[in-house]
Amino acid sequence: MHWFNNSKLFDLARQGQRLTHIAAVIPLSFLFALVAQFGAIPIVIAMSAIYGFSENIMSMEGLPATTAGFWMGMILATSFGLVYFFLWAWLKWFEKRPFWTLGYEAKNALMQYTRGFLFGTLMFAGSVGILALFGAVSFEQGDPSQQGLAAIGGVTLVLIGWIIQGGAEEVLIRGWALPVIGARYKPWVGLLISSLIFALLHGMNPGLSALALVNLALFGVFAGLYAMREGSLWGISAIHSVWNWVQGNFFGFQVSGTDAGGGTLINLMETGADWLTGGAFGPEGGLAVTIVLLAGIAIILFWNKQGAKQDLSTP
């Protein structure tokens, strides 16, 4: 596979004066992600001042969907926005290369992002289809003001936050960790280590199970392969963002064990065994998502096999 060993992401990583050592990449990935979470503190303080401090403040229970969508979007944006700054600073003063070399070339950006948005939507819809096939999902009767047409405003606003959140995780893991490690050592090392980092970053999420951890690592492999084959970060950033948005604010499931505020267009609930549905972690912790991710990995590896040198960057 020419694209695997010669992905453009590795060429972009080599444009700097130095490649960060793996012994620094791993702890810095966790440090950047952890410290960035403190960016949401001003938003939480503002919400507490307006609505009063309570255990339900982060779930935004009782708030209109549009208001909840605004605050949820702000929390996502401020919790992950600092990741971009940390990486910009690291690249500028240590690796000595511009930020766009993380996979943000302008060429074909809109096409790649749009395609990723479509792929991400279809992938998670496929997971729901598998659940429906096994009779493991049903409609849930919820607050009418938080679902359907009444929630359109909130669902739209929170999408902005998911775009920032998904992009931040991708730029950290697939834009920086994977290419830097892969360019310095071997591509498969970059893919493996970055996938494990991604899974462990979610290791403290509520409702985590062994299968959920496996699925997180599988998503890391899928995302890494997609970014490597496309030679860009635009597509996988869109897939990641819309995956979370569709999961939490279109179908109404938990997103990696957490509530997605802002309402939902269709309010579904899992009704089958946890090994299939994911239980408290949401579908990402179940076998339905495992099947979709394995199928996605297979498609990336074997799609257009006769033209192995072609990558997804071409229309």
Image: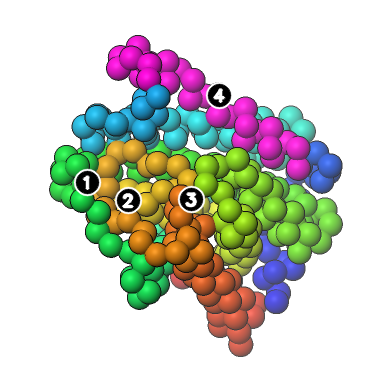
Identify the magenta region.
Answer: 26-54
Question: How crowded is the residue under tag 4: few (<14 C-alpha within 10 Å), some, or many (20+)?
Answer: few
Front: mark 1 or 2: 1
Instruction: Name the residue that disc number 2 marks.
Output: 252
Q: Main secondary structure of the magenta part?
A: helix
Please give the name of the residue rendered at 58% of the width and 34% of the height, measured from the top-left corner. 83
Instruction: Give the Cα separation between the discs numbered 1 and 2.
Output: 10 Å
What kind of residue is marked 4?
Phe
Residue 150 horizontal/vertical position (percent): 15, 43
Instruction: Give the Cα separation between the discs numbered 1 and 4.
Output: 32 Å
Camera-nearest residue between 253 and 66: 253
What kind of residue is marked 3?
Phe
* Residue 38: image tag: 4
For marks 1 and 2 on the same chain, the one whose residue lies earlier in the sequence: 1
Left/right placement of residue 170 relative to residue 177 reads: left
Instruction: Name the residue that disc number 3 marks.
Output: 281
* Residue 142: image tag: 1
Circles 1 and 2: CB atoms closer than 8 Å:
yes
Question: How crowded is the residue under tag 1: few (<14 C-alpha within 10 Å), some, or many (20+)?
Answer: few
Question: How crowded is the residue under tag 3: few (<14 C-alpha within 10 Å), some, or many (20+)?
Answer: many
Front: mark 1 or 4: 1
Instruction: Give the Cα separation between the discs numbered 2 and 3.
Output: 13 Å
Picture quadrant of residue 115: bottom left
Question: How crowded is the residue under tag 2: few (<14 C-alpha within 10 Å), some, or many (20+)?
Answer: many
